[in-house]
């Protein structure tokens, strides 16, 4: 993070919706947040939050909540598919999968998961190379309101085991690499002709909790020991509208970044399927590489390109900057200058050490808030509270902002420019 003296002790604050965060001791929290009678280190605050949530889960019974919020995301996906069921949803080389074929498999898998006892909020691993079958399996998990722990590659790694899903969906040939899930509970053949299996864990898995009330995607890190980021359904539904990316719809084709398998690939896939476009997958199946620039636990800003093409018009490219913690989307890179302009419904703040805005032209730490913000880090409440802070400048009470840890210069018209080069 930015080299400045960090306070050791914080006060705990919370919203009416029981979202928790830390705030400097002695300062009035932003609107929508109230002080909880507890203060201490980040670790102590995290332990206290875990105790409060555990007590809340006990009062809530088994914690199986209806995935109301996820209905928006799933409903938007259904709507896009229903408007053109015979149009291509996915393609890889000469193979085409229509929206009708894709959703027939998705609904079949969702039924199998429900029959296997998977409920809203429970963790389900989906592992495999970037193919139409992987997309279908991930969508099926979201449809039932569960948490999809996504592992892109030829074989599951320790990061998937660290997330402790109770069930893993993966190609049959991957079973040798997944000794933790040795009990086969379902088999099927995907749209690519590949045999897949659902395998249950022998060790106790993480079940649904009182806070797991909507479908989620967990983006695993490139290697064990780094934090996994949780994307909520309401955050992903933003990709269906005017989110500042190239307009897409029926007849358009979206090409994922290279190499496939990065978190940006997931963003492109959802953008395509939420708008009725065609997602072009790699013809040759490979392991991919999730967030290849990340070499430490700190947040990493990544520049990548969204490529779209349609009948009768040239290929369009939009270069964007984002973090895994902001859904890989934060700002567009302005041609010529390289300056960054926030996407719609995304706010950028360049703040000083007292969390106040720096004057235009000055340098401060970059914070991001708005529609793209992730829910935090999987099973790491202390790290989440240290990087997702109450938003003192936002229009909505009880909002959060993400502390990126990078220095940026505040420019006019809400633009900004990182002081150091950003990975691309």
Image (cartoon, rainbow, N blue to C red):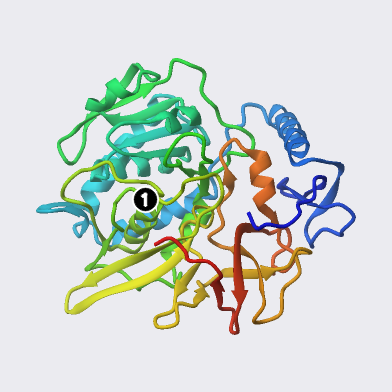
Q: Is residue 251 above or below residue 39?
A: below
Looking at this view, is 233 or 67 the one in front?
233
Looking at this view, is 282 or 107 the one in front?
282
The residue that appears at 39% across and 62% down in the rendered structure is: 424
Residue 406 in percent (x, y) is at 59, 61
Left or right: where does residue 242 sit relative to residue 18? left
Left or right: where does residue 102 sit relative to residue 77? left
Give the SS element for disc 1. loop
Q: Is residue 217 above or below residue 420?
A: above
Residue 61 in percent (x, y) is at 66, 27
Q: Is residue 125 above or below residue 276?
A: above
Residue 186 shows in this picture? no
Looking at this view, is 56 or 180 the one in front?
180
Residue 37 in percent (x, y) is at 88, 42
Q: Quadrant of the N terminus?
A: bottom right
The residue that appears at 38% across and 28% down in the rendered structure is: 168
Residue corresponding to mark 1: 262
Total count of labels:
1
Looking at this view, is 84 or 391 the one in front?
391
Left or right: where does residue 281 sit relative to residue 80? left
Left or right: where does residue 7 sit relative to residue 358? right
Q: Quadrant of residue 180?
A: top left
The residue that appears at 53% across and 41% down in the rendered structure is: 227
Badge 1: residue crowd in 10 Å (few <14, some 14–19, many ≥20): many
Q: Quadrant of residue 170?
A: top left
Residue 95 shows in this picture? yes
The residue that appears at 62% across and 38% down in the rendered structure is: 380
Residue 309 in percent (x, y) is at 23, 71
């Amino acid at each position: 993070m930015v080299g400045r003296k960090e306070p050791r002790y914080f006060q705990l604050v919370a919203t009416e919706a029981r979202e928790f965060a830390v705030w400097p001791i002695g300062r009035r929290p932003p609107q929508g947040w109230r002080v909880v009678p507890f203060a201490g280190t980040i670790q102590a605050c995290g332990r206290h939050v875990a105790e409060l949530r555990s007590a809340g889960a006990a009062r809530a019974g088994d914690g199986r909540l209806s995935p109301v919020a996820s209905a928006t995301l799933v409903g938007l996906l259904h709507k896009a598919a229903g408007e053109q069921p015979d149009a291509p949803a996915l393609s890889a080389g000469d193979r085409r999968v229509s929206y009708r074929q894709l959703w027939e498999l998705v609904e079949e898998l969702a039924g199998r998961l429900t029959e296997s006892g998977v409920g809203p909020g429970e963790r389900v691993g989906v592992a495999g190379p970037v193919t139409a079958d992987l997309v279908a399996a991930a969508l099926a998990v979201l449809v039932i309101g569960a948490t999809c722990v996504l592992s892109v590659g030829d074989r599951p790694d320790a990061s998937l085991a660290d997330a402790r899903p109770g069930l893993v969906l993966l190609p049959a040939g991957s079973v040798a690499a997944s000794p933790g899930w040795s009990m086969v509970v379902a088999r099927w053949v995907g749209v690519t002709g590949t045999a897949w299996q659902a395998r249950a864990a022998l060790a106790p898995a993480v079940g649904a909790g009182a806070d797991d009330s909507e479908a989620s995607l967990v983006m695993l890190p490139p290697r064990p020991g780094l934090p996994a980021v949780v994307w909520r359904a309401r955050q992903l539904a933003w990709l269906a509208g005017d989110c500042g990316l190239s307009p897409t719809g029926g007849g358009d084709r979206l090409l994922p970044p290279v190499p496939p398998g990065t978190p940006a690939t997931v963003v492109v896939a959802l953008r395509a399927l939420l708008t009725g476009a065609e997602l072009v997958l790699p013809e040759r199946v490979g392991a991919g590489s999730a967030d290849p620039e990340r070499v430490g636990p700190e947040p990493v800003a990544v520049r990548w390109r969204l490529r779209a093409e349609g009948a009768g018009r040239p290929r369009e490219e939009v270069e964007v900057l984002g973090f895994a913690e902001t859904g890989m989307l934060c700002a567009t890179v302005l041609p010529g200058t390289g300056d960054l302009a926030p996407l719609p419904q995304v706010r950028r703040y360049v703040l000083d050490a007292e969390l106040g805005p720096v004057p235009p032209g000055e340098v401060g730490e970059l914070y991001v808030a708005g529609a793209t913000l992730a829910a935090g880090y999987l099973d790491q409440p202390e790290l989440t509270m240290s990087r997702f802070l109450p938003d003192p400048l936002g229009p909505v009470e009880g909002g959060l902002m993400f502390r990126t840890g990078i220095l940026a210069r505040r420019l006019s018209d809400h633009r900004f420019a990182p002081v150091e080069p950003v990975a691309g």
